[in-house]
Amino acid sequence: MKKWICIVVGVVLMSLSGLAYAATTQVDALIEKLIEKNILTKQEARDIKQEIVADQKVIHEEAMKSSLPEWIQKTKLKGDARVRYQYERKKDDTEARSRGRVRFRLGLENQVNDQWKMGAGLATSETGSTADDARSTNMTFTDGFRRGDIRLDYAFAEYQPAPWGKVIAGKFVRTDYLWTPTDLLWDSDINPAGGSLHVEHKFSENINAYLNNGVWVIDENGKTDRVDPFLVYSQAGIKSQMGPVDLHAAGTYYGFNGVKGTTVDGTSSTNTLTGGVLRYDYDSLGASAEIGLKKPMGLKCIERLAFFGDYIQNLDPDDNETGWAAGLKFGDSKVVGRNQWQVKYQYSSLGKDAFLDAFPDSDRLGGVTDTKGHEWTLEYGLAKNVVVGLDYYLDDRILGTHNRQTLIQADLNLKF
């Protein structure tokens, strides 16, 4: 009988939770009377009060939201800040380099209507000659507390006429339009400019196939009669989930146009040159894969174990034309909450002319080709959306002058 009384009282009290402060005070007094008469226990009373507070919060948030203009209701704001300590040293150098760096990014997305979406983002940047580096959004602590720059990181329009397909144009984050499990070819900070298409088809409950196509503008020659360098790519991939095992695999064709016989902004100066310009074209074939297993060997402490890799081959030169990366990661699938963690190891080898040297990970010997080495990463969640990370690189040249480099990065990341 007491159980039913508690349920009825709880429903009545929650229905009163939308009233003003005076009504809330009366509710508190009523709850105290019910405790005195042993109709409610103190724990039951606390539970009811918590439900009332939660209900009041929802009502307040809904009221605030409905009072805002529709375009604000459809706009999402997101951002992150990263503070980094970085140490780097080459084997033959007498002195190491230590520096502090910070990164801040702020972005918004607006669902214009059921089919159209727009987005834009800002990010920190160095000043001076490195301000336009497409592979970095860091600002280094230097020059007597000087201020850094804020640059346009991306701005795009996206059209999705159906659940199975969407197209994007502008400068955008490439995540949904080109899948790469490693940073062998593409630094994570690079946001391409141009247009891309993503089409996906669900063959069954466990198997999806997709196709990514795009045209990305690399440079603009102004008034010269040369074609503007650009990239045309096509990627076909498949994703499957079979019980605890998941698989993602894709093949990619990169077609570079107007690149041979010129130079590319942002180059690391490791591709083969003739007369100061690129000797080869960089049309390439690539393959990517990742296979994961949930709770391997029944270990509750490891949510997922995965093996991943990338391979690339330039179709033009006969030497130093291939590259590959392979590794494993285990722990939580993604580190976003308290006590979540992930450990990752990756080995990379990228031939001198396997890919354009303006795009690979800039932390690996400055983003050059003709490099090989190891990377170990550890991430741990201190709290929700607060993550600390440790990244250790050990890299050297394949053919060039050997001078092995050690790079250590300690990060504090906060997101909203």
Image: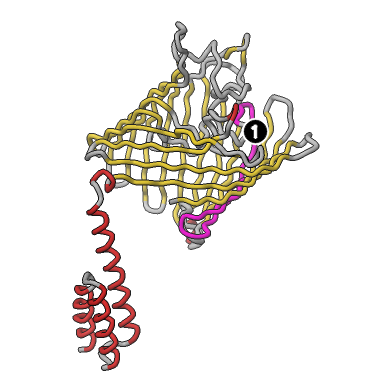
Please identify the quarter of the rendering in which residue 268 is found. top right
| Residue holding disc 1 | 365
Residue drawn at 51 percent across, 61 percent down: 339
Residue drawn at 28 percent across, 87 percent down: 40
Q: Is residue 55 above or below residue 124?
A: below
Considering the numbered disc 1 on the image, is that residue within a helix, a strand or a loop? loop
Q: Nearer the viewer, residue 91 or 23?
A: 23
Please identify the quarter of the rendering in which residue 87 is found. top right
Residue drawn at 69 percent across, 33 percent down: 396
For this orientation, the residue located farthest to the top is 225
Colouring scheme applied when the structure was drawn: secondary structure
Question: What is the span of residues highlighted in magenta in the rendered image?
Answer: 367-391
Dominant secondary-structure state across the stretch colored magenta? strand
Q: Is residue 180 above or below residue 40?
A: above
Give residue 2's position: percent from left, percent from top.
Answer: 23, 88
Q: How many marks?
A: 1
Give residue 389's position: percent from left, percent from top.
Answer: 57, 51
Dot 1 amino acid type: Leu
Viewport quadrant of the N terminus: bottom left
Q: Nearer the viewer, residue 225 or 81?
A: 81
